[in-house]
Amino acid sequence: MDINITDKIKYIGVDDTDIDLFESQYVVPNGISYNSYVILDEKIAIMDTVDYRKHEEWLNNLDAALAGCTPDYLIVQHMEPDHAGSIAETIARYPNITVVASTRAVDMLPQFFEETDFSSNTIGVKEGDTLNLGTHTLQFFMAPMVHWPEVMVTYDQADKVLFAADGFGKFGALSHDEEWACEARRYYFNICGKYGGPVQTLLKKAATLDIACICPLHGPVLKENLGYYIGLYDTWSKYDVETEGVLVAYASIHGGTAAVAQRMAEILREKGAPKVSVVDLSRDDMAEAVEDAFRMSKLIVAAASYDADVFPPMHDFLHHLLIKAYQRRRVGIIENGSWAPCAGKVMRGMLSQMKDIDIVEPMVTIRSRMKKADIPALEALADAILA
């Protein structure tokens, strides 16, 4: 893919449209891009490699960009295999290349590449260190836990380019043209969502730099309207509300709880909720459900009781929210049970483990199927959560 970042910075990444699940858990119907770049100067620097599954195509792109030249440095910003997977092949082809990475990443290199000798030609850098390539000077900023502990980002002082590692990444191959925010949001909350504090720290460092272009390791290169992208990242990493509204997430076995959830959504709309979304946790993409929960200001969970617990799709959803640091939201609970309703107690217990969650009363209990007599309780819950 022919993408020039600047006259001297070339894109050499590859699209992966054959992959079914990113990180073996996230559906990527439009694939994923593995981004890599090369800086052509007196000294030549490769900015990250790609997943091993695409290493041959990537090496061909690298050869074309080098046009017979030999690279001097390989900058490793992140050791996750979708970016570091072709390090061994790079060193085998260019045995005199110097690997530059955070000191934590240097320690991790042998964990992934047992047969590669990293005892020489490896430089561990720390916060603020620089590397001069000629007209380009690279400055390194540590970004631990965005979203691994060894991560760093790199700023090119000459062309004002921020190589942002996994920051500002999104799902979707570059060959697929689509709006940025939706898949970037799903990517952020499911990959980096737990680490809002470290992301905020990185954003504060970025605010001190004059940035003309952001080059992430997934998704499109960002050159225009950078305030929009940075603003969304600021909102997301602060766990602030992006969209006022209610997400109704339900887990239904035989359709009874699904009918309650749909009626709840109708009541919310009738009462003036600015936006209402409904998600079926048994069938819809879990990653999108997590994304919408973080995006919206309020959440109502509705689930059937199951084996003296809660129906597993709801347990899975709440577990995802817990490990991704869901917080600072108002949540209502609807439970269903034919003889011993217990889903509400379980959901309340899981929600209580999350930070600053306001559980709204009343909790609504349905017995098997929604009846006319249940509607006042649903309306009371709607009034309470919209108050």
Image (cartoon, rainbow, N blue to C red):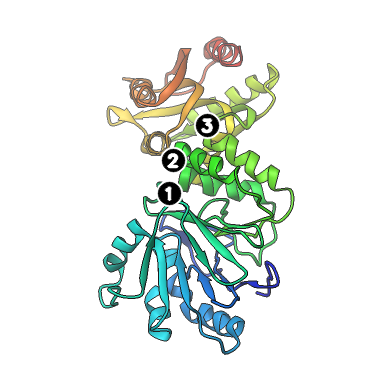
Classify the position of the C terminus by image quarter: top right
Point out which mark residue 195 bears: 2
Q: Secondary structure at mark 1?
A: loop
Please report the residue visible at 25 percent of the width from the left and 73 percent of the height from the top: 114
Q: Quadrant of residue 2?
A: bottom right
Q: Quadrant of residue 32?
A: bottom right
Please report the residue visible at 47 percent of the width from the left and 74 percent of the height from the top: 73
The amino acid on which the numbered mark 3 sits, given as a three-letter code, is Tyr
Percent from the top left, x then y, of residue 206?
Answer: 57, 46
- Compute the Cα span from label 1 to label 3: 16 Å
Contact? badges 1 and 3 (CB < 8 Å)? no
Q: Secondary structure at mark 2?
A: helix
For residue 387, above or below residue 210: above
Looking at the picture, tell me which residue is in the foreground, 20 or 266.
Answer: 20
The amino acid on which the numbered mark 2 sits, given as a three-letter code, is Tyr
Single out the residue that lies furthest toward the right. 224
Contact? badges 2 and 1 (CB < 8 Å)? yes
Q: Which residue is mark 3?
A: 239
